[in-house]
Structure formats: structure tokens, C-alpha cells
Image (cartoon, rainbow, N blue to C red):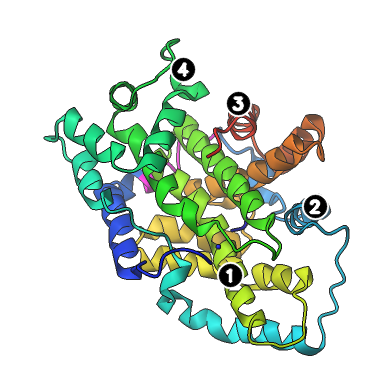
Amino acid sequence: MWIWTGIAAAIVIGASIAIIAWLHSKRVARASMLAATSTGVFPAVRRDEAETAIPFQSDAIVQINEALYAKAFGVARFDYQILGKHEVVLAAVKSSIGTIMQKQNYLPRRPTSLPKLLRAINSGESKRGEIVRLILQDPVLAGNVLKRANSVFYRQQSNEVVESVDRAVVLMGSEGLRAPVAMSVMQPVFRIPRGIFEQFAPASWEQAQRTATAAEVFAQHHKIGDSFVANLLGLLGGLGRMVVFRLTLDKYKTQSNILPRAEVYIRAMQDHGQEVTRMVAAAWEMSPQFLSAIDEQISQVAPNRMTPLARTLYYANLTGALALLHRADQYSETDAKILLRAHGIDEASLAKIWTAAVNAELN
């Protein structure tokens, strides 16, 4: 649901777009598989459910979002009257949204070894030693790979602690390696200079990771295409909010004698966060099903009438938010599960997705 400036000036938006599009292109051919999951994957919808739409939004969800913003910005309440220079800043953000993709410093960085690594992962002919060598060239990525190999999901398959990247590559395989690669590309964007709402970036990164993990597990449980696509979809929502945050920060710098207000950032993210997420996904040439999943969130389609990938994102967003608040002792597990049930999630999915989001390995 959210997600900054110190990234090197050498970031090249074209390279970022090419990398993620290239990563995803290996799976675009599976688009028909995604469409096919619209029947037979989810439990049969009862007739009364088909006739009565489950609400996309509710008072409880609004309160959850407000609690998330309060935690991320370190404020106790919001005064939504935005006047004077603050209103000027908000208008400037709105007028700049259309050109946001031209701003090179707003999007993910590209590690030097990443293009070769992605080729090696996606090639059935690459030797394990070559993949290990490329991973070790990026210490952050190597750490992410080891963390994931020692996560609950992989430790169920092996009780041994994974201490080497070589062993991690064997255990995870090419499919398992793609998510930590995506994390290593995204993580630097979730950073902002110290002093200005500095708790927002780590809170947003945590939520993005919990959401992405929930989306991946939900997709695996329901066999909704490639679970990596769901993972990336979960990350992008946070990226959209982060880009809007950084844009708003830049607009405040053009105003003299004014202290930034949380309300302006929050309103900007509420108004444009999903729009920016959609723009990034389109620029990265993601599949029509991927874009449609975002569109259905923007249109607030009823969860029980969503396409499978859109439903994955909906429940992942909600579960990721609830898990973050739960880990901060701001929301009970019982209340979280009651809310998720009220919005249509089935018990089997609830058990898996909640456990995954709460216990997500954070980087």
C-alpha cells in the first residue's frame, strides 16, 4: 500500500525497465494459464455470493489505512485541511504525475552483475557455479538469498541451516532465486534522507515485503500462474507510494519557510499512489493480466468478482497491512482474521497467507 533520495545519479530508467521486463518476459507466455485459473482454482462461489458483492472497502479498512499512515509518519492524528503553500505543493505533485517516469532517480537501481545474473537464472544451460559467482558479487543480494533459503518455507524441506550461497542455489532453484533478486533491485528505492519523516521508508519497506510474501503464498496455494509475478505485484504497490513520497519531498523543497506536513504526503499517496504503480508496471511492459490486477484495485471491484491475480493482490494488500500492525501490537490476530473473513477469504487461504505475512523474512 506504500513506498525514497540518495540513490546514485547513475540510475538509468531504461535499464531498470529492460531488466524487470526481461525478467517477466520469460513468463508472459503463461498469460493464458492465468486466465485459465478463473475456473476451478477457488472454491465454488455460492449463488448468494455471486449475487451479493463483497465490499472492496469498509470502515474497518479505512481505519487500518489511517493507522498505517499514523505509524509511518509518526503522527497521532490527521487534519485534512490542506491550505496555503501546502495546497500549492499538493497541486504541484498532481501536475507532475504525468511525467514521473522521466525522473531517473525515482526508480530502482541496477546492480552491475544483475543482467548477467538474470540471464544465468533464466537459462537452463547455466552452471550453478556461474550463478553463485554472480550472486556473490553483490553482498546485499547474497544476504537476501541466504535469508530466503533459511526462511520457514525452505526450512520445511530441509532442517539444515543454509550457510553458503552454493547450497542456497541448490535448495531454491531458479524459481526461488527470482524473488530475492527483485528485492535487491527494489530495496534502495525505499530510502529517504534523514530528518524528514525518516520512519516512513522502513515502515513502507516492511509493509511491501509482507504484502509480497502474502501474494506469493496465496498464488502458490491457488496455483495462479507464476508466484514470482504475484510477489512482484505485491512489491509494486509500495513502490508507487514511495515514488509519490519522494516527488512530494522534492516539491516541498521549492517552497521557502514551510515545514512539510504529513497530510500532504498522505493525500498525494491516496490520490496518486495506485496511478503511479500502474504507470511503472506499464513502463516495465508487464502482462495484461498484471495490469488488469492493478486496474481492479483502482476501480475497487468487489473481491469475489475479481480476476484471480487481482484477488491475490487484494488479499495480500490487506493481509500485509494487518500483519504489520499486528507485529507492532496495534491489531490483534483475532480481529485481523475476522476482518479478512468478512471480506471473503476462505479459511485455507487465510491460514497460509496470515502465517506467511506475519513471519515474512525482512531485509
Task: Give the CA separation, mark 2 to mark 1.
Answer: 21 Å
Q: Dot 1: within a 10 Å radius of its alpha carbon, few (fewer than 14), some, or many (20 or more) residues?
A: many
What's under tag 1, amino acid-wise?
A: Arg
Residue 346: x %, y % from top left: 64, 32
Mark toward the start of the polypeptide (3 vs 4): 4
Q: Which residues make up the magenta segment? A: 34-42
Q: Dot 2: within a 10 Å radius of its alpha carbon, few (fewer than 14), some, or many (20 or more) residues?
A: some
Task: Give the CA separation, mark 3 to mark 4.
Answer: 21 Å
Q: Residue at x 60, y 26 (%)?
A: 348
Mark toward the start of the polypeptide (4 vs 1): 4
Mark toward the start of the polypeptide (4 vs 2): 2
What's under tag 3, amino acid-wise?
A: Ala
Mark toward the start of the polypeptide (3 vs 1): 1
Task: Give the CA separation, mark 4 to mark 1.
Answer: 38 Å
Q: Find residue 348 and name its label.
A: 3
Q: Residue at x 65, y 37 (%)?
A: 345
On screen, residue 101 versus residue 52, left or right, reads left
Task: Give the CA separation, mark 3 to mark 1.
Answer: 39 Å
Q: Secondary structure at mark 3?
A: helix
Would you name the residue on which mark 2 appears?
A: 67
Task: Give the CA separation, mark 3 to mark 2.
Answer: 27 Å
Residue 41 on the magenta segment:
yes
Would you name the residue on which mark 4 appears?
A: 155
Would you name the residue on which mark 1 appears?
A: 246
What's under tag 2, amino acid-wise?
A: Ala
What's under tag 4, amino acid-wise?
A: Arg
Residue 352: x %, y % from top left: 58, 27
Q: Tell me if label 4 and label 1 are in contact, CB under 8 Å.
A: no
- In this orientation, which residue lies closer to the viewer: 157 or 38? 157
Q: Dot 3: within a 10 Å radius of its alpha carbon, few (fewer than 14), some, or many (20 or more) residues?
A: few
